[in-house]
Amino acid sequence: MALTKRIFSDTVRAETARRGETLLQRFGSQFALDAVAWLVAVFAAALLAYDFQVQRMPLLALLFVSAIAMLAQLIIGGAFSLYRGQFTYGSFDEVRALLLAVCAVAVVVGVPVIVWGNNVHLARSTMFLALPFAFVLMGSARYIKRLYVEAKSRPGDGAAPTLIFGAGYLGRSLVQRMLTDRYSPYLPVGMIDDDPRASHRQVRGVRVLGRLRDLPAVADTTGARVIVVAIARVDAALLRQVQDIAEESGLQVKVLPTLEEVLMGHAGLSDVRDISIEDLIGRQPVDTDVAAIASYLTGKRVLVTGAGGSIGSELCRQIVRFGPSELIMLDRDETNLQSVQLAVDGHGLLDTKDVVLADIRDREALVDIFRRRRPEVVFHAAALKHLPMLEQYPEEAWKTNVLGTRNVLHAAGEVGVSTFVNISTDKAANPTSVLGHSKRVAEKLTAGAADASSARYLSVRFGNVIGSRGSMLPTFAALIEAGGPVTVTHPEVTRYFMTIPEACQLVVQAGGIGEPGEVLILDMGEPVAILDIARRMIAHSGKDIEIRFTGLRPGEKLHEDLVGLGETDQRPRHPKISHTRIVPLAPEHLDHEDWLQRLRTNGAHTAVIGVVPERRSSR
């Protein structure tokens, strides 16, 4: 509230300066109306006190008391910021301040009248009878002024007739903002809401005109050209439904920025934007108090492998907010390191100790780095992740995803790392690909390290990340830009999706709520049909582009799993985060030749884990 008042006050001062006025010039008329209100109120109170017998009223005394009340109103009203442009005209804040000011004036002037009023034949009740008159007159003047200002601020004739989907607090606030912004490109003409309790709501004459199913009829009746979804954290499935119905009605769909964007200053609540494909396939984020959970990072030395990648760089941005004593960003790509340093430190000089150029395949280099830097918390994000590429080159998956993970775990064990979070994938659940098998082994190695050290070594498993390099959305966008065709493997293929910030949020949470040897899995809602995404992206582009089906690639599933066969789905800490355990694997039990032989013999899509029979270590 204080921030809102300050912003409004600053806006008023800036507008006043733009006009070449002083605050006294601009709000002098407001005080003049308040002064007249006291004059009228005092004489109206006297009429009541003297039973409308004007000849009995002490006119000079009444004029003197009115003048004193006016002076007190100026001083006390100024103290309550009534004449400084701090309040929105006619707002509840201004009415509350006005009531306090009027009561204070009535007391300050009324007490002397009670004591000495009879000496000048003035009724002692005059000021207290005048109080409600003055308050009503001043409040009415402000309300009329507010109506006048808002009428002048109403969007012009060029504003698009707009429907608001959602008649809750957010929707009502949006209607009010649009109606009081003369430069708004949107003029609200009605609201839509599926809640029966909202059927009779209205804001400044803008009423709820029906439910979502009534949208075509409402759009036809009102002439609306745009619909704005004003529902906080709206579910992607509902957005898809709104878009489908809106397209039939010829309506453009707009959405509001997220609360995070508003708080970070990237957008305001009235800054609507076009709906994006990310909105249509995203999910409602998991509510968790990350700041409380992530206290294990504060004051600690934190190392991130693969820091220059999509996940690693966002992870670094989130970690730095929790005040680690040192953030060590490790990657084998110097260009990626420069990008993440720009994002985290605001420069890309590459001459500071926070960036480390190293390959997780180099065991000796890792041990040397860990011994010199002594990290206490490690997030292991470095990996090869492209499924079809690893199907062609399975040995590369072994070197990076398996041996690289083993090397990082070994280096962490050498220096007594207390928390180790291995970033895995949903393809490790019931794996059918080289990628899935290699990441499954990495999970098992992490659990084995937890067994050996009793430290908090765990893995985090999630699905496809929206917008990561090489992921589906940028690929589809490039194909559409090139004129197509857009290639989809199978008409029924589905995938789980989440945003990069949410994926990294889960990783940070895992270090705080996971137990040694666990795998944490985010409930990712319902899987999304890839064909539906392709069609929506093509429709959004306005181009006529062919969709071509190429068939599932070796090792690729039609539908992904999050929890593997035989794994538990316990949720002891949060209803949306599953905790499961897998069989741990000691590094000495890895067998490279056996793993490759199994892949050659059976094919990656039918191979079992390429290690010797697993042995469960004792706890």
Image (cartoon, helix red, strand yellow):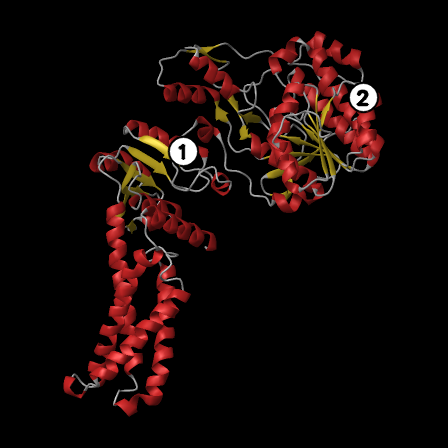
In the image, residue 41 lies at what x, y percent? 25, 74
Residue at 61% in and 24% down: 339
Q: In the picture provided, is 456 more to the left or to the right than 288?
A: right
Q: Nearer the viewer, residue 431 or 105?
A: 105
Determine the residue located farthest toward the bottom in the rendered image.
119
**Earlier sequence position, callout 2 versus callout 1:** 1
Q: Secondary structure at mark 1?
A: helix
Q: In the picture provided, is 367 more to the left or to the right than 175?
A: right
Query: Mark 1: which amino acid?
Result: Leu
Within-10-Å neighbours for mark 2: few <14, some 14–19, many 20+: some
Query: Is residue 338 depicted above or below 8 in this figure?
Result: above
Q: CA distance from mark 2 to mark 1?
A: 49 Å
Q: Nearer the viewer, residue 421 or 27?
A: 27
Res 365 label: 2
Labels 2 and 1 touching (C-beta < 8 A): no
What residue is disc 1 on? 239
Q: In the picture provided, is 22 more to the left or to the right than 381?
A: left
